[in-house]
Image (cartoon, rainbow, N blue to C red):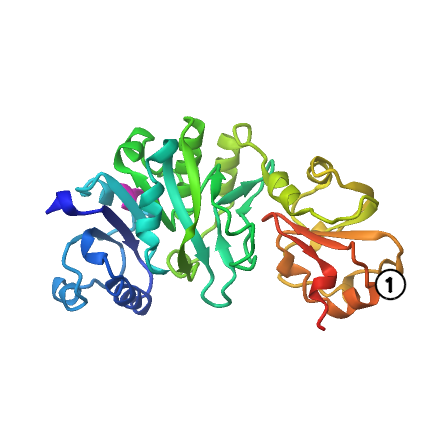
Amino acid sequence: EVDKMKASIIISTNSNRMLFENFLISLSEYPTIGDYEIIEINDGGEYSISDEQYKQYGLNNVTKIYSDKKLGYGAANNLASEKAKCENLIFMNDDIVLKPDCLEKILDVLGKNAIAAVQPKLIYPQNNLVQSTGHVFTKFTNAHALENSHSDSEIVNLSCQRQALTTALCATAKKDFIDAGKFSTEYYNAWEGMEYTLKLTAKGKKCWYESKAEAYHIRGGARNQYSLNEEAQSALFWAKWSNKINQDLYEIISKLLTNTSSGEYLLLNFSKLPDPMPILKQCDLSVLATVSYTYISGSKSLDFFRCLPNSFCRSNNNIIYFANNYTQVKNNCLWFEFRNNNDDLIIDLSGNVVHTNSLIKG
């Protein structure tokens, strides 16, 4: 039986019952789910799904593990991986909804050309925008590459190598997983998957974003049912990795900087990055002056009429609005309309480049 299985799907769950039951129903409707072994580890959740319920959903190849005490993402998945009978593992959060052929498409490329881990295009079900195409880095920040881009845009549909992936949905060989020491248990529900895939990259193996494979990721559904302080984990991660990571944000931005002005820009920095100048230099953008608004970088949505002087609105200089994500600053249609400048850009830590005139409601 096991020889015929395509891979072992590992699902660590501790989220609410409704989310998990909806997830199982959607998983049971995946046409080839019978070709996969399913290992569910209930990580201290307050409910469990009976064997009978699994059978009702038509899910038959299921191994259940229950942990009374909460282990955390890394330890729970490590434990489940020990039970896996297949050569390939697929880590899957319980807030994932698969699109047709998604699993087959990620498994197709796994193992070819030194590819040791593969993730699909993850899409927000709320708005059909991109949730993740892998990770992108600066010296001390990481972000989901192209987050909130249109899921059918040209760059999003370009499969490519990434330094690190998200394990919300990710395929990897069991042997590679064991050789890399599995997930680190120093973290607790953040960073583990990114660090595992970075380890693969550090060993000269490839992590791959496969754009033809697609799934929805509700995000936050699976792990953020309770609040966790990630500051300590963040400090630990950067202390270990900041000197080993290749700062690759500029590579994505450069690919998107077609038909931009060769003139000088005024840089307005709304991001958590103290100084985006080195990145913009690598992209061959010349900056005349920088004004920093990092003190409001935590805002989800910024209103320029409340936080910028009118002189900027009337300025003849081209402006770059640099943000954590372009969604922070995009809701300023009237401001962009007043400026009416074809060369004004929003650039963000996910690598998005947006011409502000494209945001003016026509």
Residue drawn 32% across and 40% down? 172
For residue 244, side relative to residue 32 (left or right) = right
Magenta segment: 74-78
| Residue 85 seen | yes
- Mark 1 residue element: helix
* Residue 115 shown left or right of residue 76 in the figure: right
Q: Nearer the viewer, residue 300 or 119?
A: 119
- Prevalent SS, magenta region: helix
Q: Is the C terminus in the top left, top right, bottom left or bottom right quadrant?
A: bottom right
Q: Is residue 89 left or right of residue 188?
A: left
**173 relative to 154, above or below:** above
User: How many numbered discs, if any?
Assistant: 1
Where does the image place residue 280, in percent across and percent down from the top left?
Answer: 72, 40
Mark 1 lies on residue: 310
Relative depth, front residue between 107 and 225: 107
Q: Residue furthest left?
A: 1
* Residue 67 picture location, percent across and down: 22, 51
Residue 316 inside the magenta-drawn segment: no
Depth order, front residue of 173/342 = 342
Residue 354: which quarter of the image?
bottom right
Say which quarter of the image contains residue 174.
Answer: top left
